[in-house]
Image: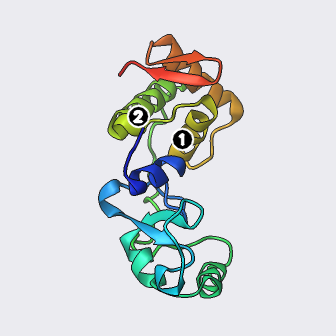
Amino acid sequence: MPTKPLERLIFAQGGLCFFCDEPLPIGEASVEHLVASAKGGDSNLENCVACCKTVNTLLGSMSLKQKFQVVLNQRGEFKCPARKAKVPAPKTSVKLPTVAQAKSERLKLVVDKLRERGDLRPKKLTSLRNFIATQFGNKLTDKELDALLNGLQSAGTIAIDGTKLTYDL
């Protein structure tokens, strides 16, 4: 279990930034106090979230009302100033992988991402489902998610005991 406050927050948030919901590497992360310390906010988990250092600097010691306004001004999708706008891939004619190849590639990606997380891997089945869905932009169907979980289990990568998980990576 993570012991530092920042690690605990990142773990609790599934490895994602609180504001933009993008993967948040520990090196880019910082603790944002929702009610700023300068305005009397404390450092308990109810008042703290993990976000990138750029957003933390942007929000600084704004009041909670001002922070909400920054987020609401994004009109439904928070655009992190630390991330560059995603440029659409050029349209080319590419041979699409077969269903089996796509599943194999997806499994490999999930295993690689889980390895990267080290001790910060999801401990419960619902958290793992959310983690996998996030890796694919929440565009997988429940059937595809179940297939990936079954593939991880069949390969011996995960063992499911009720809702708890163990890993063999």
Q: Are marks 1 and 2 in contact (CB under 8 Å)?
A: yes
Residue 23 placement: quadrant: bottom left
User: What amino acid type should be assigned to the residue bearing mark 2?
Assistant: Leu
Q: Nearer the viewer, residue 15 or 9?
A: 9
* Location of mark 2 (residue): 114
Q: Which mark is residue 24?
A: none
Q: Secondary structure at mark 1?
A: helix
Query: Residue 127 at x, y = what percent?
Result: 59, 37
Q: From what the image shows, is residue 135 above or below residue 122?
A: below
Q: Nearer the viewer, residue 101 or 22?
A: 22
Q: From what the image shows, is residue 155 above or below residue 54?
A: above
Query: Residue 2 at x, y = what percent?
Result: 40, 43
Q: From what the image shows, is residue 169 above or below residue 33?
A: above
Query: Residue 121 at x, y = what percent?
Result: 44, 36
* Farthest left residue in view: 27
Q: How much space separates mark 1 and mark 2, taking CA atoms?
A: 9 Å
Residue at 56%, 34% (x, y): give it: 128
Q: Which mark is residue 131?
A: 1
Residue at 52%, 65% (x, y): give it: 48
Q: Secondary structure at mark 2?
A: helix
Query: Residue 146 at x, y = what percent?
Result: 64, 25
